Image: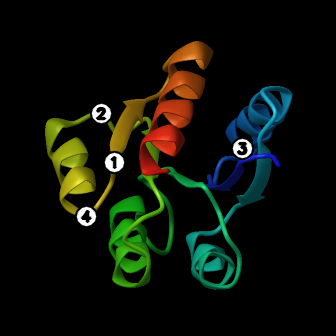
Amino acid sequence: MKNRILYVEDDPDSRELIVMLLKSEGYDVTAVEQSADVIPLARNERFDLFLLDNWMPELSGVELSRTLRDFNQTTPILFYSAAAYKADIQEAHDSGANGYLTKPSGVSELTQEIARLIAQSR
């Protein structure tokens, strides 16, 4: 059975690229554009990892991470964002994130971190 990732990214080009990459690595990816769409999916379906952008309209990745942690403390949360300030990274970790990669991290770094976090959560 494929590992399932819920990915939220407001930039369509970035979203499409990462979805293609993760699918080529054998992941089942559900991608959404708006952070508001994440909560209903996360409540009603099982995912092995949440992959979040940080700077988004509506809810930020940090706000989204906090909301996810209100009802799901076990599924790993990985930020993949261009927000590279130390304060952004610290806020993400404080919100319950298990990891933070800044764009443009290499493809292998992203897939290795995803695999590590999923394996660690089992």
Labels 2 and 4 touching (C-beta < 8 A): no
State the SS at label 4.
loop
In three-dimensional space, the C-alpha distance between marks 2 and 4, rounded to whole angstroms, equals 16 Å
Position of 12 compared to 115: left or right?
Answer: right
State the SS at label 2.
loop
Labels 2 and 1 touching (C-beta < 8 A): no
Residue for point 71% across, 76% down: 45
Residue for point 64% across, 68% down: 34
Q: According to the image, label 4 marks what residue?
A: 95
Q: Nearer the viewer, mark 2 or mark 4?
A: 4
Q: Nearer the viewer, mark 3 or mark 1?
A: 1
* Amino acid at circle 2: Ala
Where, by quadrant of the figure, is residue 66 drawn? Answer: bottom left
* Amino acid at circle 1: Asn
Q: Nearer the viewer, mark 2 or mark 1?
A: 1
Q: Earlier in the sequence, mark 4 or mark 3?
A: 3
Mark 2 surroundings within 10 Å by alpha-carbon count, few (fewer than 14), some (14 through 19), many (20 or more): some
In three-dimensional space, the C-alpha distance between marks 2 and 1, rounded to whole angstroms, equals 16 Å
* Residue positioned most to the front: 122
Q: Position of residue 47 (x, y in %)?
A: 64, 62
In three-dimensional space, the C-alpha distance between marks 4 and 3, rounded to whole angstroms, equals 23 Å
In three-dimensional space, the C-alpha distance between marks 3 and 1, rounded to whole angstroms, equals 21 Å
Q: According to the image, label 3 marks what residue?
A: 15
